Image (cartoon, coloured by chain):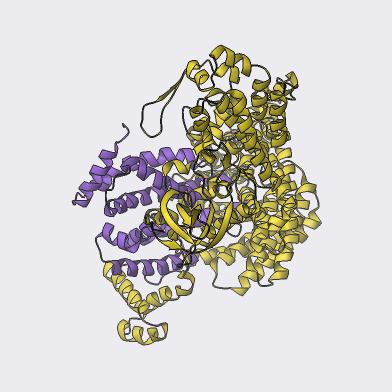
Amino acid sequence: MNTPSPQDVTGILKEWSDGDKDAPLKLMPLVYEELRRLARDYLRRERSDHTLQATALVHEAYVRMVGAQNVGWQNRAHFYGVAARLMRGILVDHARAHAALKRGGLAQKFTLDEARALPADDASDLVALDDALKLLGQTYPRKSEVVELKFFGGLEAKEIAEVLGVSEKTVLRDWNFAKLWLCRELSGEAGVGD
Amino acid sequence: METDRAEQVAELVESALERAPSEWPQFLEATCAGDESLRAEVESLLRQQGRARDFIEAPAFQLAAELFAGDERELKAGQRLDNYEILALVGEGGMGEVYRARDAELGREVAVKVVKRNLSTSDVLRRFRHEEQILATLNHPAIARLYGAARTLEGLPYFAMEYIAGQPIDKYCDAAQLPTGARLKLFREVCAAVSYAHRHLVVHRDIKPGNILVTPEGEPKLLDFGIAKVLDPEQAQTGTQTVTALRVMTPEYASPEQVRGEIVTTASDIYSLGVLLYELLTGQRPYQLQSRRPEELARVICEQSPERPSTAISRRVEVPAADGSPAKIITPESVGHARREAPAQLRRRLAGDLDNIVLLALRKEPGRRYASVEHFSEDIRRYLEGLPVSARKATLKYRAVKFVERHKVGVASAALVALALLAGITTTIWQARVARAERVRAERRFNDVRKLANSNLFELYDAIANLPGSTPARGLLVKRALEYLDSLAVESQGDASLQRELISAYLKVGNVQGNPSNANLGDTAGALKSYHKALALTEQLTTADPADAKARRFVGVINEKMCDVQAATGDIGGAVNSQRKSFAIFKSIADAAPADTDARLGLAISHIKLGDVLGNANFNNYGDQAGALESYRSSAGILESLHAADPANAKTRRLLGVIYERIGTMLEGVGKADDALAAYGKSLSIRESFAAEHPTDVDAIRDAAIAHEKVGNVLAAKGNWKEALDSLRKSNIIFRRLVEADPQNVQARHSLALSYLHLGELWDNPATPHPGRAEEARKHYLLAREALGEIDVAGANVKTRETLQLIERKLAAPRARP
């Protein structure tokens, strides 16, 4: 694929605003390639600080792909929504791979270290959160999206409302519910109804 | 769950959250209307409220959002801020904005720097104050001076400093057509400022023409000290507005250590000064960087030797302008013209001493550059006065130890990177100690090493662990790691979070020193010493806070690790003792919170570990088989109950696979073949179904293959050769698949070799009733050797070598015809 021009990306963002339902699908691979390229460059270099790196990555991707033109905050929210999903993937994959790397040991003997995480093992936390978020999405797809946009994408409630086409109040209700649900899931307490 | 039901639950929870918790019972009473399961579901969610409050509230992208939101200007032209009248915005830095302003009382122009509101997180505020403090300690004519600091009406911190209306030093020199001698004198003034800063233990870290302005009177002024300190790569992205600012360490001026490790010392400033001097003398930069990709940067800056300045001026170079204006073309004539000299004359002037001076400052290894900025500056003075200079051409010995040469000796580059990194750290630590008075900076350095302790170092260790011949490098790596951890530990008193990081780091160092459950250096005594250091730190934590649960868990984990090492050294009594201590902790944690599934899982694992050391023949053990089996059975009980409560939990299922294999091993060991077979069968069925559900999980697939093997081996021992063959073949097929999927994986190849070996042994067994027995046995031994064939045996681990020797013996053994 050729490097997309800022016009391509801005155009897709505009189509999105105008109601093109396929816009995210068109945007995704473009943003993905750019993020991957940047991620390869930067993420590998400083694994220890995912969040800061990720911030810079999306920021840089946005400026590179959309340029300095003012395309309006709604478009930015859309872009960030896509980036949030992609960054979630990248961060979680990375955490997963990292956790897998930490394992090892000889084939015929099982080491228990895999099962015994040290206190404050953030990599596995992120993986667990991602898993829980997927589960949440099965029953409550929109609530799961709200978490993705807010936590991974850093969007404000207002922007999330715009991306999802619901009221801000709904976003906040979704957020509060999702937090409870995820906490329950991550604490290992089983729900009654499922 | 039905969708309607789910919506109902969500609706009730969300409505409840809009009410006070005290109203919940009444609310649920009314709304659930006797539907007890609905109510239980809603209540189970509402119970999470305390835990959920801060959960994921700090978004992963909070900082990016802040940057985008923070477009507003903090101050407006004409606005009055205490004594200062704001005139215009002149720049935006990482965390703040810089305005030109007039001091109404003193009538002079000042620069006012203010924190951006959207960035006024505690982190940024802390760093902003650091910058201010650093500036306050520096009082030098060639350094922009701090006038005062206060807060805006809205409480945003700001400070006022000397306003410099000047030109970047490179542009100034060219515009004034300064000849080489004048450039050298101006450069020495810059050196004086940097040297002054170094004496005050401030490292600039971002020396480049843009940060050195020359006033119309010809005085250089060094700027952005605080920025340089604040804008390390980790923190840079929290507060930069531009894409270029993302790459904080202006790559063209970055030293090799900056490119690699980003922890810098005064030697890095010397290097950057060297780049600056190169540019002032030649109009060019030492490297023609084609790309800003870190790998490329690292390669060029760390490996490529810069051209001698006297040679470089003959180049014709196009410098693409960043802002889209036409590329600048540098020719020997243009360079000469800016220095009022013919190219040939300039070449002769640079050749020799000036070449050597510049190249000495640009050496790759920090320790081989000028010892200080003063030495650097002094050599230039000697040159100017016609005296012999100390900089000489690189000697043969120097060249012999250069980075590139080291590659040829076969030492892994990762190790070198690591060592360079550590060399930087030890210096930094030393500086941090010297600078006790400047506690703030020391703290920031702690953060640097803290990061390192938790990531780079150990990843680097892992990266080089499998490289042939890297043992001395790994040993050095560990030695250095310990040196700096020890020096940190001394200063860690009262800083609980640093102590926790240190505990974690000591644990990891201990593991790589001598824990047999991972790649290690075989230094068991050192490992135990490190574990003891970790234990001592946990004691400090529990003394400070007896209820510190994390500290207690650490004690459990450390003792478990000590058990591993003690068992490996043959100190079985000590190992059992340590494991019992560890067990007691995990048990008390589990007992204190019966509903905490993690704690119960932790206890189950502890039972397994205790069983291992008590009497599992696969480990160095105490010989108490009965105790081991009992411990394993307790573990199985816990795991079964966890599994019943949550059948989908992957961890529990994996551990059940483990525990039944362990129980099978014990039963097999005491000759109860049938019971062993039953236990192995359980392990197999758990692992098979788990692997089927996780077709991409290599570990799960391998576990299933191992289970087939175990079953096959018991069947073989029972003389049930056909069924045994069947199981061993199933296992073998899986191992083959794993090797096909990942041919480079040494471990997978080793497993496959063992699998062929076991098949060979089955065929080799005189009791096997088959006419082609001997041929089949030989065939399988050959296949076993072939599986290992592509492994570099010299660099392989002991186990692999042992397996290979065993195969060779089998192949050499005389084989009776049936």
**In this view, A167 is above or below B358:** below
Identity of the residue drawn at 78% across and 47% down = B526
Image location (x, y in percent) of residue A113: 61, 52
Q: Quadrant of the N terminus of chain B?
A: bottom left
Image location (x, y in percent) of residue A178: 38, 66
> Front-most of B802 and B761?
B802
Image location (x, y in percent) of residue B91: 44, 48
Is residue B810 visible to us here? Answer: no
> Front-most of A102 and B473?
B473
Q: Would residue A101 be found to the left or right of residue B316 on screen?
A: right
Q: Colour of chain B?
A: yellow
> Front-most of A71 and B279?
B279
Q: Quadrant of the C terminus of chain B?
A: top right
Identity of the residue drawn at 54% across and 26% down = B287
**In this view, B29 is above or below B495:** below
Is residue B283 visible to us here? Answer: yes
Q: Would residue B43 be found to the left or right of residue B521 on screen?
A: left
**In this view, B361 is above or below A186:** above
Q: Would residue A20 be found to the left or right of residue A175 on screen?
A: left
Image location (x, y in percent) of residue B322: 41, 33
Q: Colour of chain A?
A: purple
Furthest residue toward top: B344
Q: Would residue B162 be found to the left or right of residue B571 on screen?
A: left
Residue B204 placement: quadrant: top right
**In this view, B388 is above or below A184:** above
Identity of the residue drawn at 53% across and 26% down = B285
